[in-house]
């Protein structure tokens, strides 16, 4: 052993060496961040960092602080990192914005702006992530859009000017068919309209954005100007010559036939047609004055042509209206001088409307054609991964060509656009051709595979013609069928050729199996008849039924049939046997279904409970439930009566045979105490003053002197068929070797009911209920509980409606009682609610509603989600404040103290549905 000294060698040294005090030098960045690095806690450090970030520090300072702080406190450094990320994103967006701003300025500065380029700039800028909602891109976007709008407006005005030129030319043409005096009266108005048209055309060509107009619009305007000027310049000299001829008889006549004939008539000369007729037939008499019938006929012809034109114009038929307008003009040239001014005005209005419709039909048809050209060109310019397949491309091209045909029906054809459309469709059709070639190749391969499969089936049929393994044959035939269905797509014509060959081969291969199945069906039908005979017999022979079922199983395992057919046969085979067993069971149950007096009481109580459930009265339902429970508790009374009768019979037998214990089959007396805790075969209720029964007599003893095995020591009783029993009495028998303990720990186990000590004995339930009574009382109880739940939910909804009505009317008397509101609402909470409703509306319920929605875990409307998130962040900083789930009663009082509106009432109702049920 080591010697122990009374004093340690180090006793003179102090027990603890005092450590020199550390001097905390301030961090160099504390002055910059307001003492964030010297803060005691992480929360204080984060607060100082947020205060410092509010001062908008420089980027270099942020990087330096983040570098030092990220190693110490990542939570506080997160705010600095977010600020750095925000600055980095802002710089990146500034670079992108500068790049796209430069592109926009180049577009705007260009003398000619293409509309497609302007639209592509906005689309590509949005894809690149440029901040289009911020300056300068927001201003540039508006400028580009205005520029595009101006160009589109110019193009629209060109089309309007073109139609206006056509209408002016039509007016001049109509005037050439009327009197020259009418033309003279309308001259000034026509001169003003032509001058205005020229001014508007000059404004269009002089616009700064005229160079950006599409190339097809300037030629349209020039052609309209040339046509109008030619007609106008021919109309003015002709009218001036007509005026001069009217004033001077010797002046030449105008070149307009109608005006020349009118002037000849005024001079007393025959018309040109009459002079020609007189020259050809000098003997003929001059034509008389126009008859009324001729005037009526002319008016009728013009009205018919006018009605056709108005109908076609109203229905919007472009081509038909153009033909009707031409027909009307032809009729007007013949009969124009015989109609009145009112009809002439109607003709003029109809021609103007037809001209407008024709122009717009032509323009709209061109718009549709341009759209179809763009769609056809876009078929091959789709994004990567979105290319159309062959079948889809074929259907798309077919639809585009059908749409082009419909566009040609609504307006004049446009050969230039058709050429572009046809070229784009032909280029896209190459994909269809490649797909068709692939389909043909695959069809040839699939045909070869199917022919090879047919030959394989024929060879297999010859090889397994004499095989008796019907399951393997059936499995192989199913596999061949699956391979045929999965053989790939072939054309309908080719499939019609191959299908008979396949059916012939598979029929030849399946012939032996079908013959075996036919024989098996005959045997199974015979067994079904035998089963029907067994089921109809007065006495059911179980051995015959088992043998028949074994034969059926052997037959089913030998020859397979179709699953549905086999199931039907099995059902037909099983049905008579099941009916026989059911009859046997029904006879057995009929003998035991006679209701006892106790079962009748339970049934009557169950029917009363069902009637109370139908009434919908909670008090009646609870009373009926109590009555049913009392009827069920009556079982113990019945059991007590039975036990009393048994006890009387036992006392009578003991009086006759002497005071001796009654021994059971196992050799044990019928006493209340059993050392091993086994249950007694029949339940008997002992008398209150029954004496303690005598000890169990000795049945057998051992002939050795082991502890506990002496003759004067009683042997432990056997434990029946329990796992611990040792019937041969070997030394390993625990219970037999030890015997009962006398220390009081386990010796009184029989008196206390086992190893669980103080647990009371099971309640004596008495004889069991019959099946009918048991099911009736169980269903009645379930229905009663469900009805009570429904009534409670209904009462809860009514109480909630009354509370919302009291809030709306500011009437505290309408607030439901504490019992109606549920156990979650105490008297103090209800008092606070009534006080809130008594006072005048005040305060804002926004925060209280948010707290209630958090307490009920209910959703918040979209417009209040940001406020809810902010409130949740604030609640995280209030560590000692109670949670919303604990203060929801006060929050409801705050809501009720405010003014009521539909939105807040709906939100309050949603949360109270959950909170009042807790």
Image: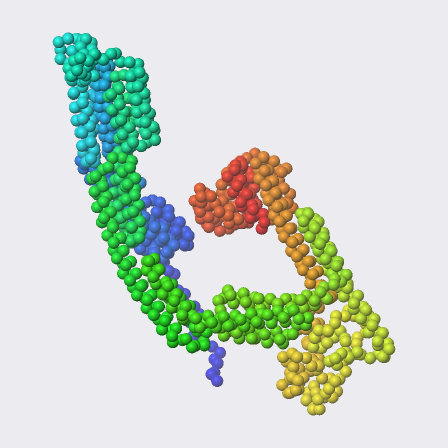
Residue 706 location (% of width, % of height): 68, 89
> Which residue is located at x 52 percent, y 67 percent?
566
Instruction: Classify residue 490 by image quadrant.
Output: bottom left
Q: Tell which of 855 and 862 is nearer to you.
A: 862
Residue 154 location (% of width, % of height): 23, 31
Q: Is residue 549 left or right of residue 643?
A: left
> Which residue is located at x 19 percent, y 24 percent?
228
Residue 202 visible in rendering: no
> Which residue is located at x 56 percent, y 39 percent?
896
Q: How many numbered discs, if any?
A: 0
Residue 647 visible in rendering: yes
Q: Residue furthest right?
A: 656
Residue 319 location (% of width, % of height): 28, 32
Q: Tell which of 187 and 563 is nearer to you.
A: 563
Instruction: Classify residue 666 by image quadrant.
Output: bottom right
Q: Tell which of 716 and 534 is nearer to you.
A: 534
Residue 721 location (% of width, % of height): 66, 79
From what the image shows, is residue 334 above or below residue 699? above
Q: Residue furthest front?
A: 283
From what the image shows, is residue 898 above or below residue 355? below
Q: Is residue 525 left or right of residue 743?
A: left
């Amino acid at each position: 052993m080591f010697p122990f000294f009374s004093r340690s060698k180090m006793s003179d040294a102090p027990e603890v060496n005092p450590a020199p005090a550390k001097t905390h030098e301030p961090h160099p960045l504390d002055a910059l961040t307001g003492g964030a690095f010297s803060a005691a806690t992480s929360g204080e450090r984060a607060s100082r960092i947020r205060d410092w970030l509010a001062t908008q520090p420089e980027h270099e300072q942020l990087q330096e602080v983040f570098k030092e702080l990220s190693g110490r406190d990542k939570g506080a450094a997160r705010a600095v990192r977010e600020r750095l990320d925000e600055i980095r994103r802002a710089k990146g967006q500034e670079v992108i914005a500068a790049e796209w701003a430069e592109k926009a300025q180049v577009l705007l500065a260009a003398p000619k702006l293409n509309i497609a380029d302007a639209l592509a700039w906005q689309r590509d800028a949005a894809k690149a992530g440029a901040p289009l909602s911020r300056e300068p891109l927001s201003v540039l976007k508006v400028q580009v859009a205005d520029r595009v709008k101006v160009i589109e407006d110019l193009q629209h005005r060109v089309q309007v000017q073109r139609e206006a030129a056509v209408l002016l030319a039509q007016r001049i043409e109509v005037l050439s068919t009327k009197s020259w005096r009418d033309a003279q009266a309308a001259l000034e108005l026509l001169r003003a309209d032509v001058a205005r048209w020229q001014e508007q055309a000059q404004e269009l060509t002089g616009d700064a954005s005229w160079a950006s107009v599409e190339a097809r619009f300037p030629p349209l305007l020039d052609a309209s100007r040339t046509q109008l000027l030619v007609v106008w310049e021919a109309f003015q000299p002709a009218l001036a010559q007509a005026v001069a001829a009217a004033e001077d008889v010797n002046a030449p006549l105008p070149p307009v036939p109608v005006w020349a004939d009118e002037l000849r008539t005024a001079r007393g000369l025959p018309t040109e047609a009459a002079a020609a007729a007189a020259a050809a037939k000098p003997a003929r008499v001059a034509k008389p004055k126009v008859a009324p019938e001729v005037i009526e006929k002319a008016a009728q012809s013009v009205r018919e042509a006018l009605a056709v034109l108005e109908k076609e114009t109203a229905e919007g038929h472009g081509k038909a209206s153009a033909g009707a307008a031409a027909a009307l003009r032809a009729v007007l040239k013949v009969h124009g001088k015989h109609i009145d001014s009112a009809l002439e005005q109607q003709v003029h209005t109809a021609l103007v409307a037809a001209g407008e419709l024709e122009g717009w039909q032509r323009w709209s048809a061109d718009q549709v054609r341009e759209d179809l050209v763009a769609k056809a060109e876009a078929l091959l310019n789709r994004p990567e991964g979105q290319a159309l397949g062959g079948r889809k491309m074929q259907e798309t091209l077919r639809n585009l060509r059908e749409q082009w045909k419909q566009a040609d029906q609504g307006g004049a054809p446009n050969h230039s656009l058709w050429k572009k459309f046809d070229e784009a469709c032909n280029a896209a059709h190459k994909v269809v051709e490649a797909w068709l070639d692939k389909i043909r190749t695959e069809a040839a391969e699939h045909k070869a595979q199917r022919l090879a499969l047919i030959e394989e089936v024929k060879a297999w049929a010859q090889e397994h013609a004499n095989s008796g393994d019907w399951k393997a044959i059936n499995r192989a035939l199913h596999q061949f069928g699956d391979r045929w269905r999965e053989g790939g797509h072939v054309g309908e014509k080719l499939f019609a050729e191959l299908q008979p060959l396949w059916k012939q081969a598979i029929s030849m291969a399946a012939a032996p199996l079908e013959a075996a199945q036919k024989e098996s069906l005959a045997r199974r039908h015979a067994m079904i008849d035998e089963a029907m005979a067994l089921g109809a017999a007065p006495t059911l022979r179980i051995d015959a039924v088992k043998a028949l079922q074994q034969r059926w199983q052997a037959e089913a395992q030998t020859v397979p049939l179709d699953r549905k057919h086999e199931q039907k046969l099995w059902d037909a085979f099983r049905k008579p046997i099941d009916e026989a067993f059911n009859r046997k069971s029904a006879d057995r149950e009929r003998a035991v279904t006679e209701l006892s007096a106790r079962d009748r009481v339970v049934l009557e109580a169950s029917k009363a409970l069902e009637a109370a459930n139908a009434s919908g009265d909670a008090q009646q339902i609870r009373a009926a439930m109590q009555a049913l429970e009392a009827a069920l508790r009556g079982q113990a009374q019945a059991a007590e009566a039975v036990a009393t009768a048994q006890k009387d019979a036992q006392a009578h037998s003991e009086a006759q045979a002497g005071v001796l214990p009654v021994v059971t089959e196992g050799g044990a007396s019928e006493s209340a105490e059993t050392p091993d805790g086994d249950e007694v075969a029949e339940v008997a209720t002992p008398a209150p003053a029954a004496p303690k029964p005598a000890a169990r007599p000795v049945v057998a003893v051992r002939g050795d002197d082991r502890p506990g095995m002496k003759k004067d020591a009683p042997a432990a009783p056997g434990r029946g068929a329990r796992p611990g029993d040792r019937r041969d009495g070997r030394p390993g028998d625990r219970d037999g070797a030890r015997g009962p303990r006398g220390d009081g720990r386990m010796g009184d186990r029989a008196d206390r009911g086992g190893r669980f000590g103080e647990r009371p004995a099971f309640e004596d339930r008495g004889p069991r209920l019959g099946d009918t009574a048991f099911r009736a009382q169980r269903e009645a109880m379930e229905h009663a509980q469900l009805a009570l739940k429904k009534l409670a939910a209904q009462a809860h909804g009514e109480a909630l409606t009354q509370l919302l009505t009291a809030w709306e009317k500011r009437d505290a008397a309408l607030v439901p009682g504490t019992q109606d509101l549920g156990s979650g609402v105490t008297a103090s909470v209800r008092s606070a609610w009534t006080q809130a409703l008594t006072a005048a509306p005040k305060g804002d319920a926004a925060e209280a509603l948010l707290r209630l929605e958090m307490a009920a875990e209910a959703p918040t409307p979209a417009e209040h989600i940001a406020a809810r998130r902010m409130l949740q962040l604030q609640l995280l900083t209030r560590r000692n404040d109670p949670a919303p789930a604990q203060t929801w009663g006060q929050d409801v009082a705050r809501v009720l103290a405010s003014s009521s509106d539909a939105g807040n009432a709906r939100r309050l109702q949603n949360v109270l549905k959950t909170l009042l049920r807790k």
